[in-house]
Structures are given as structure tokens and as C-alpha cells.
Image: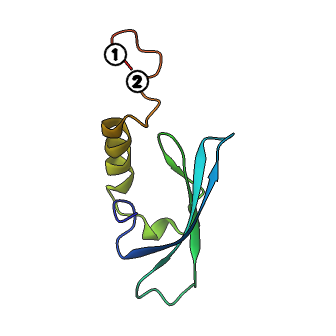
């Protein structure tokens, strides 16, 4: 989570196997505006951010890098030059 949002603390995780998504419930240390936020992690992107101000400027880029490096991304799916 710190790749996407600095000073975040994960409060809960809900995985949707059918939709291949993960909903993360979190709070930000020092943020008194709201008790908790949610965001949805997809296979190659971040969606449904309640507060886009929390997201690091390069957070989505690093998130995609992490997914590709770990093999979680669908970016290479169907590419005949890549062995999966």
C-alpha cells in the first residue's frame, strides 16, 4: 500500500475472485478528514479512489511495475513472444 499511498495503514481487504479485484480499506496516518477510505486494485490499474489526493504522483506507475515484475499483471497475457 505504501507504493500507492504514503503513510497508509490497511484496515481490511476484500477479494473478489470473479471480478479479479481486491478492495482495500485503509486510513492515512495524520489525516483527520475521514476515518477510512477504500480503493479497488485491478490486475493492471487502481480504480474507485475516494480521495485521489491520497495517491502518490507516481503510485500507479510503481503499482504496474510491481504487478508485471511479480507476474500478476495481465499485460503480457496473449503475447506470443512471452512464455507465461
Observer-nearest of 63 and 50: 63
Q: Residues within 10 Å of mark 2 (few under 14, many from 20)?
A: some
Proximity of marks 2 and 1: CB atoms separated by less than 8 Å = yes
**Looking at the picture, does residue 15 appear above or below residue 2?**
above
Observer-nearest of 6 and 56: 6
Say whether residue 44 is left or right of residue 65.
Answer: right
Position in image of residue 40 (x %, y %): 57, 55
Q: Residue at x 39, y 60 (%)?
A: 4
Q: Residues within 10 Å of mark 1 (few under 14, many from 20)?
A: few
Disc marking residue 22: none
Q: Secondary structure at mark 2?
A: loop
Q: Which residue is mark 2?
A: 76
Find residue 64 and report its image quarter: top left
Observer-nearest of 48 and 27: 27
Say whether residue 35 is left or right of residue 45.
Answer: right
Q: How many marks?
A: 2
Going from N to C along the chain, the mark reached first, 2 or 1, is: 2
**Looking at the picture, does residue 46 appear above or below residue 35?**
above
Position in image of residue 84 (x %, y %): 39, 20
User: Which color scheme did the rendering employ for the protein?
Assistant: rainbow
Q: The N terminus is located in which quarter?
A: bottom left
Q: Residue at x 60, y 41 (%)?
A: 20
Find residue 13 and report its image quarter: bottom right
Alpha carbon distance from label 2 to label 1 = 7 Å
Observer-nearest of 84 and 47: 84
Position in image of residue 72 (x %, y %): 43, 37
Q: Residue at x 49, y 65 (%)?
A: 52
Position in image of residue 69 (x %, y %): 30, 38
Q: Secondary structure at mark 1?
A: loop
Say whether residue 63 is left or right of residue 18.
Answer: left
Find residue 7 and report its image quarter: bottom left
Q: Which residue is mark 1?
A: 82
Amino acid at each position: 500500500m505504501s507504493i500507492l499511498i504514503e503513510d497508509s495503514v490497511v484496515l481490511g481487504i476484500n477479494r473478489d475472485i470473479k471480478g479479479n479485484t481486491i478492495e482495500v480499506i485503509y486510513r492515512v496516518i495524520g489525516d483527520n478528514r475521514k476515518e477510512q477510505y477504500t480503493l479497488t486494485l485491478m490486475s493492471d490499474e487502481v480504480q474507485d479512489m475516494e480521495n485521489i489526493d491520497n495517491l502518490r504522483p507516481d503510485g500507479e506507475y510503481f503499482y504496474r511495475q510491481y504487478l508485471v515484475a511479480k507476474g500478476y499483471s495481465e499485460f503480457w497475457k496473449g503475447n506470443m513472444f512471452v512464455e507465461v
